[in-house]
Amino acid sequence: MAILRSTLALLGWLAVSFAAGVIGSQFRPDAWYESLVKPLWNPPNAIFAPLWTLLYALMGVAAWLVWRGAGFKGAGVALVLFGVQLVLNTLWSFLFFGLHRIDLAFFEILVLWALILIVGVLFWRENRLAGALMFPYLAWVGFASVLNFMLWQLNKGLLS
Amino acid sequence: MAILRSTLALLGWLAVSFAAGVIGSQFRPDAWYESLVKPLWNPPNAIFAPLWTLLYALMGVAAWLVWRGAGFKGAGVALVLFGVQLVLNTLWSFLFFGLHRIDLAFFEILVLWALILIVGVLFWRENRLAGALMFPYLAWVGFASVLNFMLWQLNKGLLS
């Protein structure tokens, strides 16, 4: 039964992570986004969906490893903060693509990045591999923060 | 470095699995599919993408667990067959949605189902959890086989 429980738990953690992605993807690149002045190194739209799918899968596996090792009792803070960062992750898409508030989105993504770092460290303490699995996500959100800042600076005229 | 290697390997196994999904998703429900006579229990189109994303993630984790435990040397046959079933998985989408050959797709999915069963058993022998993670996929493809058969029988007039 431990195997069944573990399998269902992985399914659950992956489902929670992907759910954040599915909700966030309701707010997607639109005509407004296309009209923004972008830095030359702005990634093509096509890479976001596969990249985020991988990142959500990695973070889902990370949370599952921590849950398997320590449970909610042993790693409650880390797992709750993991859930909070998922909410912030979705919120960013809403602020940026939904409200077109590049400025708010930038401040929010800094909070998100810091929280991912904290979750990564807490995960690392429980399980080295789980911490490592958060790293690509942390790196990408770091890159996205810089991109968000550039888009804000290059398109200040659009915010009134 | 074992952690880095393990993290990159999970990324790799997930990428391989999702790649099969991305290629297969080039062949998707079209006007022809909408026109088919369907059984009442035919699932709504909206569930396929999230469900398959989960199944690809689970099988990617399963292959990674087997690879971590036994490597290509210890579990070469299982891992190669895992790759073969991914190809057959993609091929089904091509036969069904690409060529509209419901009959060929049905025979192919039977082979796919049998191969998933074999891979699941081989994975189970290496790592109980990895075997269990293949089970939702096996169950879904079993269901899809029955659905494929029904669609074939209900729409024989379309095949000439």
Image (cartoon, coloured by chain):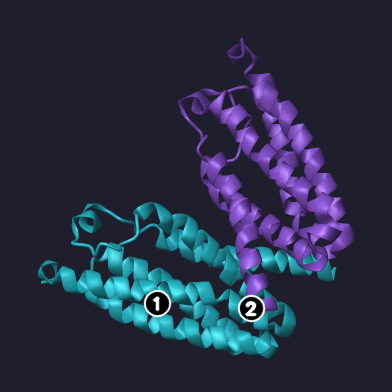
Chain colours: A cyan, B purple
Q: Residue furthest top?
A: B160
Chain letter for mark 1, please. Answer: A
Check disc 1 and report the residue beneath it: A142
- Residue B12 in view here: yes
Give the residue displayed 24% in from the left and 72% down from the top: A150
- Judged from the image, the secondary structure of the residue bearing numbered disc 1 is helix
Q: Amino acid at mark 1?
A: Gly
Query: Which numbered disc, 1 or 2, marks the residue that appears first in the sequence?
Result: 2
Q: Are marks 1 and 2 on the same chain?
A: yes
Please tell me the numbered disc located at residue B27: none
Between residues B14 and B152, which one lies in front from this camera angle? B14
Above or below A54: residue A105: below
Give the residue displayed 62% in from the left and 28% down from the top: B95
Please tell me the numbered disc located at residue A130: 2
Question: Quadrant of the image for the N terminus of chain B?
Answer: bottom right
Between residues A130 and B41, which one lies in front from this camera angle? A130
Q: Are marks 1 and 2 in contact (CB under 8 Å)?
A: no
Give the residue displayed 63% in from the left and 52% down from the top: B17
Mark 1, other Cα within 10 Å: few <14 / some 14–19 / many ≥20: some
Residue A58, horizontal then vertical, whole percent:
58, 68
- Judged from the image, the secondary structure of the residue bearing numbered disc 2 is helix
Between residues A6 and B82, which one lies in front from this camera angle? B82
Mark 2, other Cα within 10 Å: few <14 / some 14–19 / many ≥20: many
Give the residue displayed 68% in from the left and 30% down from the top: B148
Q: Residue furthest right?
A: B125
- Residue B41 in view here: no
Question: Quadrant of the image for the C terminus of chain B?
Answer: top right
Q: How many marks?
A: 2
